[in-house]
Image: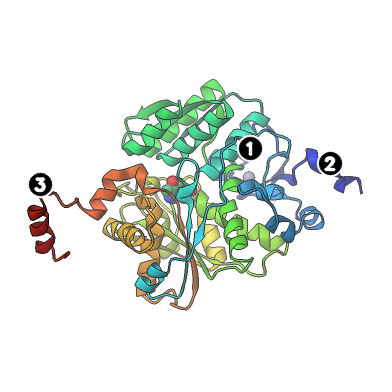
Amino acid sequence: MFEDSAFDNERRDFVLGLRCISCGRELAAGPGVYTCPACGPKEGILDVIYDYERIKRTVSREQVTGSTDYSLFRYLPFLPVRPDTPRPHLRVGWTPLYRPIGLARQLGISRIYVKDDGQNPTASLKDRASVIAVIKAVEERMTTVACSSTGNAASSLAGNAAAMGLRTFIFVPGRAPQGKIAQLLIFGANVISVQGSYSDAFRLSSEAIERWGWYNRNAAINPYLVEGKKTVALEIAEQLGWEVPDWVVVSVGDGCTIAGIWKGFCDLYRVGWIDRLPKLLGVQSTGCSPLADAFRENRPWCPAEENTLADSIAVGVPRNPEKALRAVRESGGKMVAVPDEEILAAMRLLGRSSGIFAEPAGAAGLAGLRSLLEKGEIGREEKVVVVVTGNGLKDVKNAIAAAGEPIKVEPSLDRLFDELTRRKLV
Ligand SMILES: *Cc1c(COP(=O)(O)O)cnc(C)c1O
Ligand SMILES: [Zn+2]
């Protein structure tokens, strides 16, 4: 069959088109098509539709398992990029899935896995989306990429764009932590620090993108970015030998990550590589929980304040609320909000029991899991994967708030003896 010839596979991806999540209308994928023209940029979020039958016929699970591409591109048939488009040299994805025994013991649960996405090139899960963004920008012959972000989307875009030789304009809210700003500046981004909230930064970036015609990496608007994020689910499935866990736990801001995780598992299910789907637990901070509140009260979401130290999920006006809520509901999962103190406690627990350093939003998932275990809403015999979405070095201020100060001592063994004895450390 011509369709399956090697010639064809080298040049084409497996994308059939785009479908609007509100009205169901199908559109051809092409440059400049980001949202449904009938529903508009708020409601008209698009989903990428693949030729699952063709994937089934031409690619096997075993082929992927045998791949020596230790990056998210081992799943190329499930990605909306042409095989012949240049890619940045950075290794994005294929992050470790650990089974930390100490953490399991502390939580009183037998099968807990931690997917450490802080080990991506710019130290957050956002690299999965940004690497797709810069590849799509090159496919569309753009030379400048822009986004607004609470920090990690920005630093990952700046890093991946630097690796591709693209120029970036980054709009960040005034409160972004220094570590993330430092990354942006080192990667050579044009950094616009918007003196206002994330919503203000988002609006200004949209206006500027429109005005100067830059490539738009705003995650909810650009349908290809969720496709990059979904690879975390493909990896979890493969790393567990294609045995799907009972729960996948992740923190939620705009909602693109959790929606992406759901898309990933659904894609695998559609091609028959897995035989069931996990439940999703989406976690927010009680200081900013528009989606967890809407879920719990089973009502439409409404804007919330942004009062949390977990800056990556301080999103009062989420950009992908419907996709996120739908994903959690379809999965038969839950959403929960936890106070910031519990997020800080989860950072300590993760660090001390497992040697994994998470930023607050990266540990929020674990805090949510802990709370549902205590309430008995997740069983201690269930198999759970917690996704750590970002590394703690991005935000050392809050890490020190979580962990406390070091033991200060004069350079004298006697003084050290006194201090250690007083603290009952020796
Ligand atoms: C962006 C981000 C999230 C949440 O992802 P959304 O797509 O906004 O829901 C969680 N943790 C970290 C570290 C992030 O950077
Ligand atoms: Zn539509």
Name which residue lies at 92% across and 49% down: 1
Counting other residues with Cα less than 10 Å from the Cα at mark 3, is it few (<14), some (14-19), or many (20 or more)? few
Q: Which residue is mark 1?
A: 37
Q: CA distance from mark 3 to mark 1?
A: 68 Å
* Figure quadrant of the C terminus: bottom left
Spot occupied by residue 366 in the image (x, y as percentages of width and height): 39, 62
Closer mark to the observer between disc 2 and disc 1: 2
Q: Could you say which disc has been placed on residue 410 in the image?
A: 3
Q: Is residue 32 shown above or below 72?
A: above
Which callout, 3 or 2, points at the residue further toward the start of the chain?
Answer: 2
Q: Secondary structure at mark 2?
A: helix
Closer mark to the observer between disc 3 and disc 2: 3
Q: Which residue is mark 2?
A: 8
Q: Is residue 4 visible?
A: yes
Q: Is residue 271 shown above or below 197?
A: below
Q: Is residue 133 shown above or below 248?
A: above
Spot occupied by residue 106 in the image (x, y as percentages of width and height): 35, 71
Name which residue lies at 40% across and 66% down: 369
140 vs 123, left or right, is right
Q: Nearer the viewer, residue 388 or 201?
A: 388
Q: Could you say which disc has been placed on residue 236 in the image?
A: none
Which callout, 2 or 1, points at the residue further toward the start of the chain?
Answer: 2
Q: What amino acid is labelled 3 in the image?
A: Glu
Q: Tell me: is circle 3 under 8 Å from ligand 1.
A: no
